[in-house]
Structure formats: C-alpha cells, structure tokens
Amino acid sequence: MTRSTYFKSLRFVLLPLALLLLANIIFSLVAFNIARLVGELKSVLGTGQILVSPFLEARARLAWGTTVLLFYATMIAVSIVCVTIIHRSLTGNKRLIFLAVGTLITIVVLGHLAYSGYFRTNFSYIFFFTFDTLRASQIYTASQLTAIKSLVSGINVLAGIVSTLALVSGCCLMSQKRGAEKANLFVLVTQMSHLKSFIGLLSAMLVTGVLHMIAWLHWPPALITNDSLARRVIDFSDAMGLYWGATFSLLIATFYIPAAWFISNRAEAIITEYPDQIQGMERQEWLKKHNMSLSPYQQIPELVAMLAPILVGPIGATITKLSSPFSGG
C-alpha cells in the first residue's frame, strides 16, 4: 500500500471532529444560563438548607467515585489497545506522522478545555456546576475539594488524550494493507472484524464518560433539603447527560458508518473484478456470510454500540437516583 493511501485513511477522523465542533457550538449557544443556575443553587446553599442526611451525601459521593473508577480503568484499557493497534499497523515515518496528527488534535482539545476553564465558558460549567455547588456548601475541607478537583481534571485531560488516540488508531485500522497485486477479500473481512470490535471498545469508553457526567451532576441534589428544587436539578442534570450522550452516539456513527461503507464497497468492487474469489457464491450471500453486508439486520450489534451512550443516560439516572434526597435513606 502506498504512503498516500495510508494518509488517506486519516480522512475518517474529519467527520467526528466536525461533529464535536458542531456539538460544542450548539451547546454554547443554548446553554446560556448555566452560570445563573449555579448562582441560584449557591444562594440556596447559603441559607443553610443543605444535607438532609449525611448518608444521602455519602451515597451521591460514592456513586460518583464508582464512575471515576470505571472511567479510569476503561481509559487505561482503551489506551493499551490503541497503542497496540498503532504499533502493529504502522512503522517508521508513517507512525510518526499519524502520531503528529494525533498530537496536534490533542493540543487543540486540551487547549479548548483550558480556555473554557479559565474564561468560564458554558462548556466548562459541566464541571463548575457541581464543583461550585460543593464549595458553596462548606461541608468539604480544602484538601477534599482539591482531591475532587484533581480527579475530575485528570478525567478531562485523559478523555481528551485517549479520545484522540482512539480516533487515530481507528484510522490506522482503515490503513491496513488490502493485499498485493490481486486484492484479497479476506483481508477486508479481517479489517471489518477489527473495525466492529473497535467500535464496541469506543462505545464502552464513551458510555463510562456519560455515566461519570450524570453521577457528577447528580451530586448537588443530595445537598438540598428542598425536594422540589432537588428534582428540578436532577431533571436538568439528566438533560445535560442526554445532550452529550446523543453527541457521543453520533460520534461513533460518524466514524463507523463511513468506514464500514468504504470496506463494504471495496469488497463489492473486488468481487466484480475478481468473481472467482467468492467461489461461485452470490455477491450479497457472500457479503452476509462474512459480515460485510450493511443491511440493518447485520448491523444490530453495531447499532447497539452506537446508541449505548445516549441510552445510558436514563439507565445512569436510574442508578444515581438512589442518591437523591427524596429517595429515602
């Protein structure tokens, strides 16, 4: 495979990046009053209407801690897989160029996080909504707040790095050699199989991200004695989880659908040119037999993987609902 063909595989990163940019722009435009909402919560906490029961606060905190553990463990696993993919797929200058592209994207992502945090943009209030509330409650020591902030900051940085690493390694999967002079269909079968496995891994990573976001945003309601207000805060948190869950589901789709379509079309082109490779089978029959067909029936596992981030919102809300002040305890 020529060098240019390797680099063409990087085009599969463009749609996901464009989607992330669009999602951030829309969120910045529609989430224009979060700072005011935080101010209202802080004023309520200032009246002393906090901590109905220490057990409720502890449950919310431990629920969040569980998602932190899941997130870090998943990120470590995804990092190992991605590094292995890059190491096996590329060598020499090709590997350096792919890593350079990944580094550039990572710098942009982390720069956006740093800018958002410093200037308190709407995006940064995913973090500050809860952290400012915890600080205003005055029930946590300075060292405890520092530990909480460090854990969440680590998650944000790791998410930016590993997500970029995952996209680049996905492009590496698409850059695998298709064969020598006579293209080999079974190389494409292996490539499609690796792509499907990779999408499952990417989905797991994004699901843990949504779970953490929901648990993080469900922490403040555990500090509020006003049940009506607590319910409204939880509903707001669930809406936030729904938005970013939808974004993450679309992120998977914008990578997987073009990649799978490319592999399937390449296989059909090879079958047309070298019909002897399918040994007399019908083209569609061969594609279905080897999981190369893009028919909805054969894409059910991938559809589940794509929908998992948006579906986990209601599931995560149900789990963390146990931490709400009106759930008993």
Image (cartoon, rainbow, N blue to C red):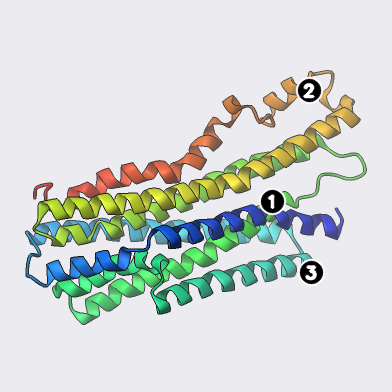
Mark drawn on residue 93: 3
Q: CA distance from mark 1 to mark 3?
A: 17 Å
Mark drawn on residue 8: none
* Rendered location of residue 144, percent (x, y): 23, 76
Mark 2 — residue? 283
Residue 107 lies left or right of residue 286; in this view the side is left
Q: Earlier in the sequence, mark 1 or mark 3?
A: 3
* Rendered location of residue 266, percent (x, y): 79, 38
Q: CA distance from mark 1 to mark 2?
A: 24 Å
Disc 3 is placed on an element classified as helix
Identify which residue is drawn at 84% across, 58% down. Answer: 4
Identify which residue is drawn at 13% across, 56% down. Answer: 56
Q: Which marked residue is nearer to the observer: mark 2 or mark 3?
A: 2
Residue 302 lies left or right of residue 236; in this view the side is right
Between residues 84 and 185, which one lies in front from this camera angle? Answer: 185
In the image, residue 182 above or below residue 132: above
Identify which residue is drawn at 23% across, 70% down. Answer: 39
Mark 1 — residue? 173
Residue 213 lies left or right of residue 278; in this view the side is left
Residue 22 lies left or right of residue 265; in this view the side is left
Identify which residue is drawn at 84% across, 29% down. Answer: 271
In the image, residue 174 above or below residue 277: below
Disc 1 is placed on an element classified as helix
Q: Inspect the image, locate mark 1, and give the three-letter code of the amino acid beneath it.
A: Leu
| Residue located farthest toward the bottom when viewing the structure as drawn | 142
Label 2 neighbour load within 10 Å: few <14, some 14-19, many 20+:
some
Label 1 neighbour load within 10 Å: few <14, some 14-19, many 20+:
many
* Rendered location of residue 164, percent (x, y): 58, 62
Q: Inspect the image, locate mark 3, and give the three-letter code of the amino acid beneath it.
A: Asn
Between residues 257 and 235, which one lies in front from this camera angle? Answer: 235
In the image, residue 186 above or below residue 322: above
Q: Inspect the image, locate mark 2, and give the three-letter code of the amino acid beneath it.
A: Arg
